[in-house]
Amino acid sequence: QVQLVESGGGLVQPGGSLRLSCAASGSIFRINAMAWYRQAPGKERELVAAVTSGGSTNYADSVKGRFTISRDNVKKSVYLQINSLKPEDTAVYYCKMNIRTVFQFEMDYWGKGTLVTVSS
C-alpha cells in the first residue's frame, strides 16, 4: 500500500508565493519520476513540472521561470516552489510518483490534491 499526501496549498494574493509538498509512504522500494499536475475549474488536468530520478526537470511553458520542482529521496518527497503567482494558476495541484513497491509492482500513484487559489 502506497499513499501520497500533498500539503501547502491555500489562498494567496497575485504576485505571492507558495511551497507545495508531497510525501509518499508505504511499501516503497524505489521512487522513479515525480511530477506535479494541476486542474483548474472546467479544464483538464495538465502537467506542471516533473523531475526524474536523476534530477532532470521539465516544466510547462506557462510556469517556466516561476515554478521550481525539487525532490528529496530520503524523505520520499517532492516539492513545488511557486512564485509570482497569477490568478490563472488557481487550481487543484496533484503530485504523482512512479513507484516500485517492495512487492516489485511498478505504477503511478497520485495524491488527492491541494487547492491553490490566487485572488486579491
Image: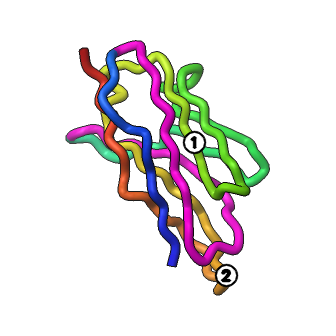
| Magenta extent | 14-41
Relative to residue 27, is residue 3 drawn left or right? left
How many marks on residues?
2
Residue 59 on image: x %, y %: 58, 34
Say which element carries label 1: strand
Which of the image's four quarters has the C terminus? top left
Residue wearing tag 1: 79
Say which element carries label 2: loop
**Whole-number angstrom distance, CA of label 2 to CA of label 1:** 24 Å
Amino acid of disc 2: Val
Q: Residue at x 31, y 45 (%)?
A: 44
Along the viewing direction, whichever of 93 and 17 lies nearer the viewer: 17
Residue 90 on image: x %, y %: 31, 31
Residue wearing tag 2: 102
User: Does 21 appear above or below 116?
Assistant: below
Residue 16 on image: x %, y %: 42, 17
Dot 2 surroundings within 10 Å: few (below 14), some, or many (20 or more)?
Answer: few
> What is the quadrant of residue 12 in the picture?
top left
> What is the quadrant of residue 37 in the picture?
top left
User: Does 105 appear above or below 61?
Assistant: below
Amino acid of disc 1: Tyr
Relative to residue 100, is residue 8 drawn left or right? left
